[in-house]
């Protein structure tokens, strides 16, 4: 075992956070699209991958779209229309309405609310899963009882407390948009994420556990909703011999080429999850004795997809760290470390890490939006996790030997 970084050489090939893993089947279906000349937003690959994904998730319908954000947008638009009726010209379906949203997530989760004219109200994170806090959500309804829509994500592939969230929403008559972009293949009480909301979305972005380089899907058990989203995604063309449009539409349909990649990938979802789980468990074992923990989950109720393994440094073991909107600095201190030090050290050895998602209420674009915590004591759980947490290299092509080196690099930061 290494005692310090003086004995460690940089990796010859970069160790990535989470890069695409191709198997060859993807090329087969891409070539099939070329041979059949389906180089468009229609074709066999799209039809088949919609069936495959719907079966895997356990829903009746899947609509293949250009990206996860497109799926979230149309899910949010559909929810707004269901709640408030069709939008007026130049307005979104959520115009003037508050929407409760996960605070610690990628901004795509909440941007789509803004697309539709809604006002995101950010709900603080809870420590058990790093997802939206059911207690904070209940408090938000007490403060703003007129809200009728909740948008929540499953962070880093770990399911949120679905039963508690749904119970809160049911008590207040609110609909749910479930963002399962990061959690494809993860289960809560044996049920796949992406099936719990009134409207659901997944992503096939380049760094996801299954990728098409891009792409996403809207998931539902309603044929009417699936047909509506499919229509919207193809510029809302009416059934006429010419291009007829009665409502706003979007160029959101998935390419048959992208669908071919996803089609080839889907057979390997369980394999990818198993590989990611091994990485998580190896970190958990290799970092024992350090003042750190990995991103938590409830093993009795859920099985994550382990998309990203994340580290949280104990409060007492944090060296001084300062962050502005664009830069981070730290002051080294013996026996302590911080996310900035570990991430900068990983870069020196040609490995990629990443800070935890910066909470939405701390983002300049949303700094004036409302933010609700679980209690009156002012504790901001998301901000604390952001300050002390980081995402570790979690690429499923990383070897055990490479991960052992990364573990020693992390250990060296606490010497």
Image (spheres, helix red, strand yellow):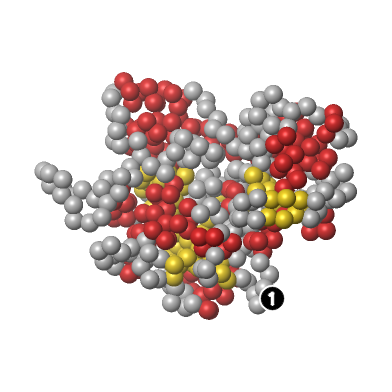
The picture places residue 402, in percent across and down from the top left corner, at: 73, 30
Which residue is at 79% across, 59% downward?
Answer: 315
Q: In this rendering, would 376 be left or right of 239? A: right
The answer to whether residue 413 shows anywhere in this view is yes
Which residue is at 31% across, 20% downward?
Answer: 35
- 359 is higher (above) or lower (below) than 400: below
The answer to whether residue 298 shows anywhere in this view is no
Rendered-image quadrant of the N terminus: top right
In depth, the one of 344 and 267 nearer the eye is 344
- 147 is higher (above) or lower (below) than 127: below
Q: Which residue reaches farthest left? A: 241
How many callouts does the rendering have?
1
Which residue is at 83% across, 58% downward?
Answer: 316
The picture places residue 203, in percent across and down from the top left corner, at: 47, 44
Locate residue 81: give its quadrant: bottom left
Q: Where is mark 1, residue-wise?
A: 377
The picture places residue 8, in percent across and down from the top left corner, at: 81, 29
In depth, the one of 304 and 308 nearer the eye is 308
Q: In this rendering, would 49 be left or right of 250? A: right
In depth, the one of 270 and 181 nearer the eye is 181
| Residue neighbourhood size for the residue with mark 1, other residues' Cα within 10 Å, grouped as few (<14), some (14–19), many (≥20) | few
The picture places residue 5, in percent across and down from the top left corner, at: 83, 34
Kindly state the secondary structure of the residue where label 1 is placed: loop
Rendered-image quadrant of the C terminus: top right
- 392 is higher (above) or lower (below) than 263: below
Which residue is at 66% across, 25% downward?
Answer: 13
């Amino acid at each position: 075992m290494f005692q310090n970084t003086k004995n460690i050489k940089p990796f010859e090939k970069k160790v990535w956070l989470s890069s695409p893993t191709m198997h060859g089947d993807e090329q087969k279906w891409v070539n099939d699209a070329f041979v059949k000349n389906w180089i468009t937003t229609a074709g066999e690959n799209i039809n088949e991958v919609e069936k495959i994904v719907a079966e895997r998730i356990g829903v009746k319908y899947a609509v293949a779209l250009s990206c996860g954000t497109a799926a979230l947008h149309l899910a949010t638009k559909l929810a707004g229309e269901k709640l408030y009726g069709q939008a007026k010209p130049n307005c979104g379906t959520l115009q003037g309405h508050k929407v409760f949203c996960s605070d610690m997530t990628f901004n795509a989760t909440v941007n789509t609310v803004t697309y539709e004219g809604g006002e995101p109200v950010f709900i603080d994170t809870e420590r058990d899963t790093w997802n939206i806090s059911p207690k904070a959500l209940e408090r938000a309804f007490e403060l703003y009882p007129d809200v009728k829509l909740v948008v929540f994500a499953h962070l880093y592939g770990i399911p949120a407390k679905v039963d508690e969230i749904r119970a809160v929403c049911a008590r207040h008559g609110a609909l749910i948009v479930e963002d399962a972009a990061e959690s494809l293949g993860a289960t809560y009480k044996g049920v796949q994420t992406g099936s719990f909301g009134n409207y659901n979305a997944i992503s096939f972005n380049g760094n996801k556990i299954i990728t098409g380089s891009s792409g996403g899907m809207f998931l539902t058990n309603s044929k009417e909703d699936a047909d509506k989203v499919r229509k919207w995604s193809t510029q809302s063309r009416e059934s006429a011999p010419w291009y007829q449009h009665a409502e706003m539409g979007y160029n959101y349909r998935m390419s048959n080429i992208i669908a071919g990649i996803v089609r080839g990938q889907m057979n390997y979802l369980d394999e990818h999850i198993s590989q990611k789980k091994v990485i998580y468990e190896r970190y958990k074992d290799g970092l024992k004795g350090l003042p750190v923990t990995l991103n938590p989950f409830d093993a009795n109720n859920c099985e994550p997809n382990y998309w990203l393994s994340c580290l949280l440094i104990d409060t007492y073991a944090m060296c001084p760290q300062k962050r502005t909107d664009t830069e981070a600095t730290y002051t080294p201190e013996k026996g302590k470390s911080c996310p900035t030090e570990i991430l900068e050290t990983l870069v020196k050895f040609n490995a990629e890490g990443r800070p935890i998602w910066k909470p939405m209420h701390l983002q300049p674009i949303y700094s004036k939006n409302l933010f609700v915590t679980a209690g009156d004591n002012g504790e901001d759980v998301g901000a604390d996790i952001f300050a002390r947490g980081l995402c570790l290299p979690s690429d499923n092509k990383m070897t055990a030997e490479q991960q052992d080196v990364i573990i020693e690099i992390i250990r060296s930061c606490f010497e």
